[in-house]
Image (cartoon, helix red, strand yellow):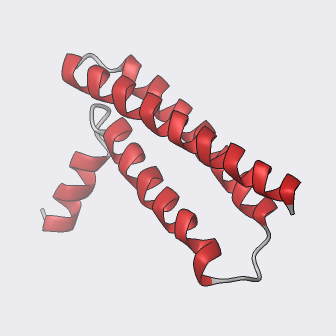
């Protein structure tokens, strides 16, 4: 087995899917958080829609995390997903507030 095949089989195991999904969504959230600063041509509605989609993704990751049998993954999934959902909702409300002011 190659190294990539071993890494892919570890990532796609049922126990590690929620953690992998959380990390990918977190990286995407950081990228889209700094996108309006780098490009002035993007609409804030695009960011609002993206953060709404990210919040749905964090909910899916939370559901996948709760379905696992590993207690540490369940705890990690609940804590991290609830924190990221709250942060995503806060950023979305800030964007909406910014649109209302402008």
Horizontal and vertical percent position of residue 96: 78, 49
In this rendering, the answer to whether 12 lies above or below 29 is above
In this rendering, the answer to whether 17 lies above or below 15 is below
Pick out the residue farthest to the front.
101
What residue is drawn where x is 77% and y is 64%? 44
In this rendering, the answer to whether 60 lies above or below 21 is above
Res. 68 in view:
yes
Horizontal and vertical percent position of residue 62: 45, 27
In this rendering, the answer to whether 56 lies above or below 4 is above
Q: Is residue 83 left or right of residue 13?
A: right
What residue is drawn where x is 77% and y is 82%? 41
Horizontal and vertical percent position of residue 9: 24, 49
Question: How many numbered marks have been drawn onto this rendered protein structure?
Answer: 0
Horizontal and vertical percent position of residue 80: 36, 34
Q: Is residue 30 left or right of residue 1?
A: right
Q: In which quarter of the image is residue 69?
A: top left
In front of the other: 64 or 102: 102
For the N terminus, which image quadrant? Answer: bottom left
In front of the other: 86 or 28: 86
What residue is drawn where x is 87% and y is 63%? 102
Res. 2 in view:
no
């Amino acid at each position: 087995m190659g190294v990539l095949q071993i890494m892919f089989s570890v990532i796609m195991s049922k126990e590690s899917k929620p953690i992998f999904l959380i990390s990918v969504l977190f990286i995407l959230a950081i990228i889209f958080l700094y996108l309006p600063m780098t490009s002035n041509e993007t609409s804030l509605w695009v960011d609002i829609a993206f953060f709404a989609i990210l919040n749905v993704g964090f909910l899916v990751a939370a559901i996948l995390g709760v379905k696992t049998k590993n207690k540490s993954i369940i705890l990690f999934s609940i804590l991290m997903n609830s924190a990221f959902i709250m942060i995503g909702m806060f950023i979305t409300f800030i964007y909406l507030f910014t649109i209302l002011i402008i």
